[in-house]
Image (tube, grey):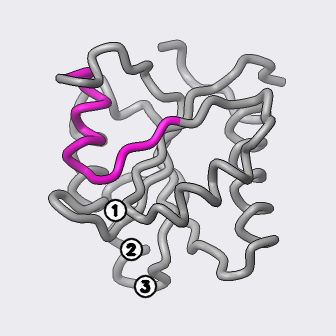
């Protein structure tokens, strides 16, 4: 079982969902949560450009779909096309439960698609479950 701390990059434009995710992971010893507000900043973070020059390579990406400047589908496609990034697991974490979005994301090689729960307790349970699964059970390639 994995015992190292993982870096999670949350790509999310909703301040409320950012705060909920932070609260769900508050006090966690499994992960360190980083966040950016849109797809343009996500790609800068992943390429360590500009203000993200010291950003860690994330072990997991929580990616929303509907964001300004560059949406999650575009970000997912760019990540999975880049040799240096495509091994990073991407969990789509979005409000959309549209079959078209689900099919598109799996076609673009997301690792998991989760529709955000509406109930607070369920939201926390899902975020904590994702962290536990990717942080303790799954073994990824060395960075």
Quarter of the N terminus within the rendering: top right
Q: CA distance from mark 3 to mark 2?
A: 6 Å
Give how far across and how far down residue 6 sits, in percent: 63, 26
Give how far across and how far down residue 21 sits, in percent: 63, 54
Q: Is residue 103 left or right of residue 25?
A: left
Q: CA distance from mark 3 to mark 1?
A: 12 Å
Residue 103's disc is: 2
Q: Residue furthest bottom?
A: 98
Decide: is 52 above or below 70: above
Mark 3, residues whose alpha carbon is within 10 Å: few (<14), some, or many (≥20)? few
Q: CA distance from mark 1 to mark 2?
A: 6 Å
Marks 3 & 2, CB-CB < 8 Å contact: yes
Q: Which residue is mark 3?
A: 99
In percent of the image, x 35 and y 34: which residue is there?
86
Q: Which residues are magenta?
A: 34-49
Give how far across and how far down residue 105 sits, in percent: 37, 64
Is 46 within the magenta? yes
Mark 2, residues whose alpha carbon is within 10 Å: few (<14), some, or many (≥20)? few
For marks 3 and 1 on the same chain, the one whose residue lies earlier in the sequence = 3
Give how far across and how far down residue 136 sits, in percent: 78, 32
Is 127 within the magenta? no
In percent of the image, x 41 and y 62: which residue is there?
64
Marks 1 & 2, CB-CB < 8 Å contact: yes
């Amino acid at each position: 079982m994995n015992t190292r701390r993982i870096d999670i990059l949350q790509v999310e434009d909703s301040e409320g969902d950012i705060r909920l995710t932070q609260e769900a992971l508050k006090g966690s010893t499994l992960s360190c949560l980083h966040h950016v507000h849109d797809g343009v900043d996500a790609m800068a973070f992943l390429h360590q450009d500009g203000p993200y020059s010291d950003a860690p390579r994330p072990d997991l990406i929580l990616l929303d779909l509907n964001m300004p400047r560059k949406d999650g589908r575009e970000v997912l496609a760019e990540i999975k096309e880049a040799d240096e990034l495509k091994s990073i697991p991407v969990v789509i974490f979005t409000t959309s439960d549209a079959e078209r979005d689900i099919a598109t994301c799996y076609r673009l090689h997301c690792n998991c698609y989760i529709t955000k729960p509406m109930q607070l307790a369920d939201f926390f349970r899902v975020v904590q479950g994702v962290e536990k699964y990717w942080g303790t059970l799954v073994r990824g390639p060395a960075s």
